[in-house]
Amino acid sequence: MRTRRWLPYALLIPGILWLAIFFIAPMFNLGATSLYDPNGSLDTGYRMTFHVANYGDALSQYYPQFLRSFSYAGIATISALIIAYPLAYAIAFKSGRWKNFLLVLVIAPFFTSFLVRTLAWTAILGDNSTFVHFLHTIHLLGPQGRILATPVAVITGLTYNFLPFMTLPLYASLEKIDPRLIEASSDLYASAFTGFRKVTVPLSLPGVVAGTLLTFIPASGDYINATLLGQGARTSMIGNVIDSAFLVRLAYPLAAALSFMLMAAIVGIVIFYIRRAGTEELV
Amino acid sequence: MPTATSTRSPSQPVLKTPSQIHRARVWFRSHLILLVGIVVLGYMFLPVFVVVALSFNEPKSRLTYTFDKFTFNNWLHPCQVGDMCTAVGTSLKIGILATIGATLIGTLMAFAIVRHRFRGRAVTNLLVFLPMASPEVVMGSSLLTLFVAAKFPLGFWTILIAHIMFCISFVVVTVKARLAGLDPRLEQAAMDLYADEWQTFRRITLPLVMPGIVSAALLAFSLSFDDFIVTNFNSGSTVTFPMFVWGAAQRGIPPQVNVIGTAMFLFALTLVLISQLLGARRRRRLG
């Protein structure tokens, strides 16, 4: 291409402006809101008093929800990895000419609306469902025991709803592996398991990192599953708190502090994780 | 090249002749993983079956969400429940506009990032990556504080603005992948044959990138149509389909919700299968 140095900037301007105004600027505004005087209100307006104590208040009141969010999201991410890896592996190496069709099947269930399929889980895990009756019959669950409205239900929903975000990156990195490398390991007398452990897994690591992040991040901020499947304060996550603080109680400074902390925590976790996994080229 | 080996097909095992037992184990193992994969797919489809079944359900009362009696009624009269179809219409409108906006903006960005070396490329990449790495609550709530501070009335337009914002990154990533995989020699060949830059772009580059742009647009539409959390913060009194379902979940869910869920599933599935078939046919034609 000839040198027209203004061209890339012309192509970028709409996108950069949109993201700067509607993504970056709101983040700064959120940070500012989190430092407002909490005694103001939406009607009378808030005064900027650099009230850092908002953060302390938010954390001391809502640290259980923070911990719950990250532990639910963590368990859901690990479960999703365990479920998605064999599927991605099967599609990448064993599906032959059905590969594209199977990939369509992987995303197809997620074309039904997020909320509608989460509601379907309330039917599957409900107190009168076949599944719960079965658990009663095999005594895995006590006679009064239930699944719906427990942490198990919330984690089940989180695991399920973000599965494509785990499966597709895993598939993408598994698919890139040269099968001759795995053959070479068996030629060098590695057992199938050793070959898998020493060749396939390390080479699929970028997919594992991308998949776990793409699952963990939305799962930790989600509150649809906690509301519909958890149905109560005992399973409420940080998203529930932020939602009701902004939209019901209209306590903007506190809510903004919570939201900002969630963002900071996630950025921290992502940076730490990417450093540890040594896949910085991902970003 | 020695003639003795050249007659052997490359897929035949050359060095090893596995024993019967070994072969059985290999067969079992390779099919075991396939079997596990099929079980996982079954699990992924479980809620879809429930949604389809419930779309034919006549529930005993509004508050029960279990299968009671079979009926076609929900499919015949999907708009019986108050505002659901209005909400679906709003979602469609926002979805289409957001798809057009985000696909245009995102495709331009992808071209700039893949095809040009410029200062600030790393920062641009980071700017594109960040929205995908942010939880929706944070994006939704921060945008709300901006709109409130600017005294911008919440409603249709604020939802649209928000949807374009979070769709752009996904469009960029999708189109970028397609562009990066293009063979630059195809464009060089066109130029060698005296096509000018614009002709090359229109006749060679754009058709080759089109599948990427189409899948980016499909992705943007489904992200927009399905979004609840960001919308919930910025909707004011406008009700999209996910917002309607959320409200209904508190009051009792009409079975017609599952009709929409099933219809969306079938529509998207058909669309994707058609594009797959067209793609396969094109590949065959090109050899």
Image (cartoon, coloured by chain):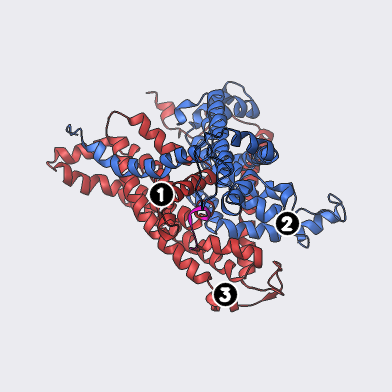
Chain colours: A blue, B red
Q: CA distance from mark 2 to mark 3?
A: 26 Å
Letter of the chain that mark 1 sits on in the rendering: B
Q: Which mark is residue B81?
A: 3
* Horizontal and vertical percent position of residue B34: 61, 45
Residue type of the residue flagged with mark 2 = Leu
* Horizontal and vertical percent position of residue B192: 15, 37
Query: Quick one: A65 or A249, which is closer to the camera?
Result: A249
Q: Which mark is residue B150?
A: 1
Residue carrying label 2: A125
* Disc nearest the viewer among 2 and 3: 3
The structure residue drawn at horizontal position 58% and vertical position 67%, both measured from the top left corner, is: B257
Q: CA distance from mark 1 to mark 2?
A: 44 Å
Q: Categorize mark 3 by other alpha carbons within 10 Å: few (<14), some (14-19), many (20+).
A: few
Would you say residue A71 is visible in this rendering? no
Magenta residues (range)? B232-238
The structure residue drawn at horizontal position 57% and vertical position 74%, both measured from the top left corner, is: B81
Is residue B235 part of the magenta span, yes or no?
yes
Residue type of the residue flagged with mark 1 = Ala
Callouts 1 and 2 on one subunit: no
Is residue B176 part of the magenta span, yes or no?
no
Q: Categorize mark 1 by other alpha carbons within 10 Å: few (<14), some (14-19), many (20+).
A: few
Query: Quick one: A255 or B64, which is closer to the camera?
Result: A255
Residue type of the residue flagged with mark 3 = Val
Letter of the chain that mark 2 sits on in the rendering: A
* Horizontal and vertical percent position of residue A63: 68, 37
